[in-house]
Image (cartoon, rainbow, N blue to C red):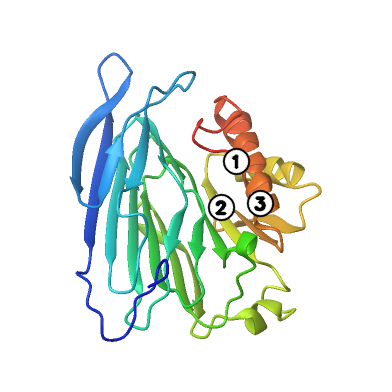
């Protein structure tokens, strides 16, 4: 059985991983861990944040990937006045399956005057992968959020083609209890022919979405557009008070570099944070 195979006639115990991490602002103004729960195969680590002005939490999937029928549920929250960055140790792999999709739910909560960065690394869809992923964000009226997701279609370094697969990607953002932005990408037949369509992916092998909620979305848009100069196919705009950036690229590695450049520019320009990503990001 090859890597990631889930063949008919073979059984595999389904995985139901979960992780919860939350931070609060202490009386001395420092953001500190307030809540931590984890269930295999998900773990949360806390490396030295070095020059960061906020704690850093790293999500780890010790199972090495996700197959059909697996579920992963993650919650990340920051209380009033707190700040944190939540990232991932490595790319997530979605293996091929003939069964139900892998289901991933990421729920974010940001309190009054708080800030959260949700910095996932790329998710790699193997040929035949089926993924149903949802990201919800519940923001206070003056909360700041920088959240993004990256998708790679197939393993380009191995010359892999997408002959079959399915993808359901949903985003939902609430501001002060009011739903302000919903987006969905639903692909029941994900293959190279679909990726090649000019009106869809125009030959892209990777895509990314980045959402920024902040006090000055116009400034965020201008920063993003400046950082996107030279990107293959990208844009940034304002929707319902949120700055939304989209990227498409036939070269996944280049998209990752462009994405990182935008992220660094936004965190430095909006919040005076270090204009670089955590050490475990390699671009």
Q: In the displayed structure, does residue 257 sit left or right of residue 16?
A: right
Q: Position of residue 265 (x, y in %)?
A: 65, 35
- Characterize the local packing of mark 1: few (<14), some (14-19) or many (20 or more) Cα atoms within 10 angstroms: many
Against 173, residue 26 (above or below) is: above
Against 79, residue 38 (above or below) is: below
Mark 1 and mark 2 lie on one chain; the one further toward the N terminus is 2
- Residue at label 1? 263
Q: Position of residue 198 (x, y in %)?
A: 75, 78
Task: Using the numbered discs, state the Cα–Cα distance from disc 2 to disc 3 in whole angstroms.
Answer: 17 Å
Disc 3 vs disc 1: which is toward the camera? Answer: 3
Mark 3 and mark 1 lie on one chain; the one further toward the N terminus is 3
What residue sits 46% from the left and 69% below the top?
169
Q: 149 or 116, which lies in front?
A: 149
Q: Residue 80: which quarter of the image?
A: top left
Q: Secondary structure at mark 3?
A: helix
Q: Are marks 2 and 3 in contact (CB under 8 Å)?
A: no
Q: 217 or 281, which lies in front?
A: 281
- Residue at label 3? 253
Could you tell me how many numbered marks the image carries? 3
Give the label on residue 210, or none.
2
Q: Are marks 1 and 2 in contact (CB under 8 Å)?
A: yes
Task: Using the numbered discs, state the Cα–Cα distance from disc 1 to disc 2 in whole angstroms.
Answer: 8 Å
Against 50, residue 185 (above or below) is: below
Q: Secondary structure at mark 2?
A: strand
What residue sits 63% from the left and 40% below the top?
283
Q: In the displayed structure, does residue 241 sit left or right of residue 182?
A: right
Task: Using the numbered discs, state the Cα–Cα distance from disc 3 to disc 1 in whole angstroms.
Answer: 15 Å
Mark 2 and mark 3 lie on one chain; the one further toward the N terminus is 2
Q: Position of residue 25 (x, y in %)?
A: 29, 25
- Characterize the local packing of mark 2: few (<14), some (14-19) or many (20 or more) Cα atoms within 10 angstroms: many
Q: Residue 170: which quarter of the image?
A: bottom left
């Amino acid at each position: 059985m090859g890597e990631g195979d889930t063949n008919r006639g073979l059984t595999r115990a389904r995985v139901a991983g979960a992780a919860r991490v939350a931070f609060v602002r202490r009386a001395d103004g420092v953001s500190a861990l307030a809540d931590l729960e984890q269930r295999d195969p998900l773990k949360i680590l806390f490396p030295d944040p070095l020059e960061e002005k906020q704690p850093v939490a790293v999500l780890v999937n010790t199972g090495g990937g996700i197959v059909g029928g697996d579920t992963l549920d993650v919650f990340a929250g920051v209380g009033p006045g707190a700040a944190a960055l939540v990232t991932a140790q490595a790319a997530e792999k979605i293996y091929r399956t003939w069964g139900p999709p892998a289901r991933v739910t990421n729920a974010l909560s940001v309190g009054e005057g708080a800030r959260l960065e949700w910095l996932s690394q790329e998710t790699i869809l193997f040929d035949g992968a089926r993924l149903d992923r949802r990201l919800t964000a519940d923001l206070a009226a003056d909360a700041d959020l920088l959240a993004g997701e990256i998708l790679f279609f197939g393993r380009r370094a191995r010359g892999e083609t997408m002959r079959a697969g399915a993808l359901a990607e949903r985003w939902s953002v609430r501001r002060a209890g009011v739903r302000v932005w919903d987006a969905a990408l639903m692909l029941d037949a994900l293959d190279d022919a679909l990726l090649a369509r000019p009106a869809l992916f125009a030959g892209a092998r990777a895509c990314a979405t980045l959402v920024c909620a902040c006090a000055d979305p116009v400034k965020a848009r201008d920063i993003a557009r400046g950082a996107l100069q030279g990107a293959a196919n990208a844009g940034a705009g304002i929707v319902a008070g949120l700055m939304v950036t989209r990227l498409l690229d036939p070269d996944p590695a280049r998209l990752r570099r462009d994405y990182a450049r935008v992220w660094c520019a936004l965190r430095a320009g909006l919040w005076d944070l270090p204009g670089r990503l955590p050490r475990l990001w390699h671009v």
